Image (spheres, coloured by chain):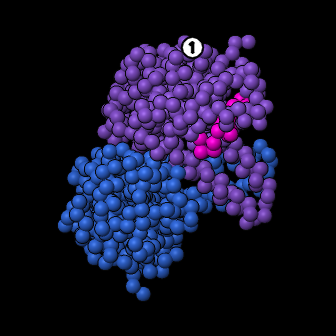
Chain colours: A blue, B purple
Amino acid sequence: MKQYKIVIDTKGSDRGAGMMIKGASLALQKYPELAVLLVGDTDVMLAECEKNGMPMDRVELLEAPETITNYDSPAEALFVKRDSSLVKALEALSERDDLVGLINAGSTGALIAGSMRYLSGKDRVRPALAAVLPAANGGFTCLVDTGATIDCPASTLVHFARLGRDFMKNLYRIENPRIGLLSNGAEPTKGNKLVKETHALLRDAEDINFVGNIEGNKALSGECDVLVCDGFAGNQVLKVTEGAATRIITDIVKYSKKTGDESLMKLVGYLMGIYDFNSLGGGVILGTVKPVIKAHGAANEQSIVSTAGIILNLAENKELFDKSAFDIKE
Amino acid sequence: MKQYKIVIDTKGSDRGAGMMIKGASLALQKYPELAVLLVGDTDVMLAECEKNGMPMDRVELLEAPETITNYDSPAEALFVKRDSSLVKALEALSERDDLVGLINAGSTGALIAGSMRYLSGKDRVRPALAAVLPAANGGFTCLVDTGATIDCPASTLVHFARLGRDFMKNLYRIENPRIGLLSNGAEPTKGNKLVKETHALLRDAEDINFVGNIEGNKALSGECDVLVCDGFAGNQVLKVTEGAATRIITDIVKYSKKTGDESLMKLVGYLMGIYDFNSLGGGVILGTVKPVIKAHGAANEQSIVSTAGIILNLAENKELFDKSAFDIKE
């Protein structure tokens, strides 16, 4: 069996190295083709590996005494903290052909800056942070960007459309992904200045299957495979959806207590299965030569397993993935 | 009993004049102090009034043969369609002291342009379209702007903060409304260029009780009374919330059918009561000398009743409402 080795940065998660390694252990159980390179404090990693009964023939450790936190300036930290788990992980991924991807749950800013520095390939394209979300029709929608790029020109959004398109082709084998543009109205005349300019560029791009503007209430309806927006708007879609789902589930719990109908807790479990963002494995950095996934800071073990699954899926299409980084120019 | 007469534009609703007049009839039943000036086709209005058994001593009719639709250019339509129900309604509201507010369910663009033209007072401040939404803590949050102003400078958002503040003071008697700024992170350094500039202005404004940046997942948590954003972002908050709520309710209906547990439909009714945007009465135009409310195009009778209730509430604080239009300069 061909083996795929994924780099896991064990530092930076709100839940500590123990959770990351527990997640790695579960992923190794689930995917026999998986191996992992764990990066962090060797003592801590060894203890956690033992605790989880890890198959050590599929585990490699890389010592990294320093940690980049959310309080560090992302760009600066990459230069100052040379011995951080993130820099060590990115260096290894960039230098070694046997490593197929990276999972990190630390500073998003540092991960994006680092991915750009170590993994952006010869063109140094601007990376995007995408999220793959469950659509109402049972499919998935790739929302891009969700926060990597807050202020940008229309050409960057067109670039994101191509990154998202190639990603969805790879991950779900969608032949010709439908690209939508987030706007405040379905008509081409609707949108802010950036959206109107982007609309015209996407409409004229022959390699893009543009399906037009999509309103916020249809963002996750499944009417497009890739929904393009700037990082500010994408962050709103993600967080407003999360806020609304959390709130409605809380309302159901309250209603269950009020009415004494405990059977409703089964429904709560069902809904949490659909709307648990942990199970979606966090954000994917697009525009890199190898897949890099940002798990949520509050991600749990299960999200590490899902994330590993996404990287394995992408690694098997390595050729296409590389293409997305090298062929697209801003 | 003091009587308050509200102008109701019976044209422009997706559901027709019948719905608007049915709503007016229910509002007249609910509020004994209410009277209405119905604007539209006299024949149609008379027939619908008779059908609903309206108390004609509290009903006045104003003939308006033309209709402004969503297909008309808003600014142009106001000049070309002088006999439209919207122009007639705005003219009456602006000229007659006995009229306290306006309800319309037609073209939002024309209503905003018309409000600016007929009701903006001496300062011609830029109006905003606000939505009052139920917060998780049981209170209400005024989201402003939700779509009237898509591209604007930071000074306009500060102006919207003041309009929202005065509105919430009037409507809910909140002493010193807390103003939040929608951003992609809680820290002051987070946001796009517009949000960062607005943050600095709001922080320094002595008359604004600024509580800082609010992320999308906290938009309706109740952490602020007024949530300020540009119309593009506000439209996303509104529509993404609507989309998520609709989708989860649909999921519960599906789950109910799958499990055969029909008692869940009671829960669906309960949730729809909370998340039914119709019951909130649509958007409120702020920055006018008299209250103007835009009911959703797909609004139902009940939303006309709620809307009338909001206008009555505001009309009783007429002095303060006028102040919001006259004292605030951009």
Work out which quarter of the rendered image holds the C terminus of chain B and state it: top left
Q: Is residue B80 left or right of residue B168?
A: left
The residue tagged 1 is B97
Q: Position of residue A293 (x, y in %)?
A: 39, 63
Report the span colored magenta.
B13-27
For residue A158, which quarter of the picture? bottom left
Image vertical order of residue B278 relative to residue A142, above or below: above
**Left or right: B24, with A228 as reference point:** right
Count up the numbered dots.
Answer: 1
Looking at the rendered image, the quarter that the N terminus of chain B falls into is top right
Q: Estimate the x, y position of residue A47 in percent, counting from the top left.
A: 46, 64
Which amino acid, by three-letter code, is at mark 1?
Asp
Report which quarter residue A60 is drawn in. bottom left
Q: Residue at x 55, y 21 (%)?
A: B92
Please give the name of the residue rendered at 51% of the width and 58% of the height, measured from the top-left corner.
A220
Q: Is residue B263 highlighted in magenta?
A: no
Residue farthest left in this picture: A122
Residue found at the very far bottom of the displayed protein: A1
